[in-house]
Image (cartoon, rainbow, N blue to C red):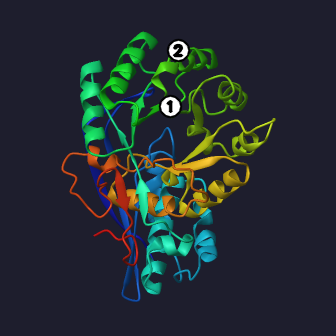
Amino acid sequence: MKLVMAPVRLEVTRPIQTAHGPMDVRTGWRVVLEADGVTGRGEAMPMTSFTEPAPATERALRAFELERMPDSLQEIARATEALSNTPAARFAVECALLEHLARRKKVPVAALLGTPRTQLKVNALIEGDDAAALAKAAERAAADGYPVVKVKVAARPLSVEAQRLLAVRRAVGPKVGIRLDANGGWTEAGARSALRGLEALDAELCEQPVTADDVEGLRRIRHYVPCKIAADESMLLPEVLTRMLEKDPAAAVDVVVLKPTALGGLIRSLQIARTAHAAGVGAYATTLMDGPLARAAAAHLASVLPGNDGFAHGLSTVELFGGAEPDAFTPVNGVIHLPQTPGWGIG
């Protein structure tokens, strides 16, 4: 059995400014596996800073072939093991296999992974060219019921960042959380200065304040600044994960961010979450600015994460694409209600 592939292109309604530069378009492939009258679907949207380059994804998907469909999570893991060096491709294939199995068993994919929660809090990623525009976006998100707003930082001078972020706090009031995402764009000294200087912001947490491999920098920052620290890009370095979770005397981070597209699938992401939970570290799921199907898969993962830390998940990103139609995973009042239909629960 071979995959059937179709190209996907999604354009962001306004470029998202990150520490690595603006992002305005996402491309990839929707994949389908069909056997015995049952269809399973996946989506691969590689991003070079997080996954393999797109040509490697395409080669891996075109070369993938199965003799028979797996009948368990263990068999799915073995069937995709050869794709370990191409996580975006592995994610897409695993998704197709998971949905095929779930549809044969007539259950949601999440039920294959654990005991799912039916409601998921999500954050809103907000953008704005200046403080006034960013505050207006934050105000809209709060009015739409989002419990947390997320802002990309580290691409502008700290004085400008502070002005923008404090405008957001004034716009949303004290009850809405503010999540920062530095994408590894600060030095350790810069992160300390920024996060201590922004103490009045009462930020919920900061994702990846320093580079992915700087575990000890994360550990020192965590014990120096007033907000929680989350690992994002660091999750992509297998040798780093064990060091991050070592208690010295505590783990290097408070939270791990799970991007199943970049981590090679839901099964591996869930294994990481369980390891983190055992170390006293929380977890939440996000997309890699993927399309609707990958967002649905990330929501199924989010519903079975161990513990109940109350973190909002980064799953409202599909709404940032032009022409995106509402679906079963479109947040309502800042909440996604997990469909109970077999498979992903999305058309």
Instruction: Tell me the number on the disc at residue 183.
Output: 1
Which sits in the foreground, 319 or 13? 319
Q: Residue at x 57, y 17 (%)?
A: 196
Return the x and y of residue 239 as percentages of the image width and height. 72, 43
Location of mark 2 (residue) = 197
Q: Which of the two labelled residues, at mark 2 and mark 1, occupies the earlier sequence position?
A: 1
Badge 1 marks a residue whose secondary structure is: loop
Q: Amino acid at mark 2?
A: Gly
The quadrant holding residue 236 is: top right
Q: Residue at x 54, y 64 (%)?
A: 304
Q: Is 241 placed above or below 184 here? A: below
Q: Is residue 27 left or right of residue 237?
A: left
Query: Does the residue at mark 2 contact the one at mark 1 (Cβ under 8 Å)?
Result: no
Neighbour tally class for label 2: few under 14, some 14-19, many 20 plus, Cα within 10 Å: some
Badge 2 marks a residue whose secondary structure is: helix
Q: Amino acid at mark 1?
A: Asn
Neighbour tally class for label 1: few under 14, some 14-19, many 20 plus, Cα within 10 Å: many
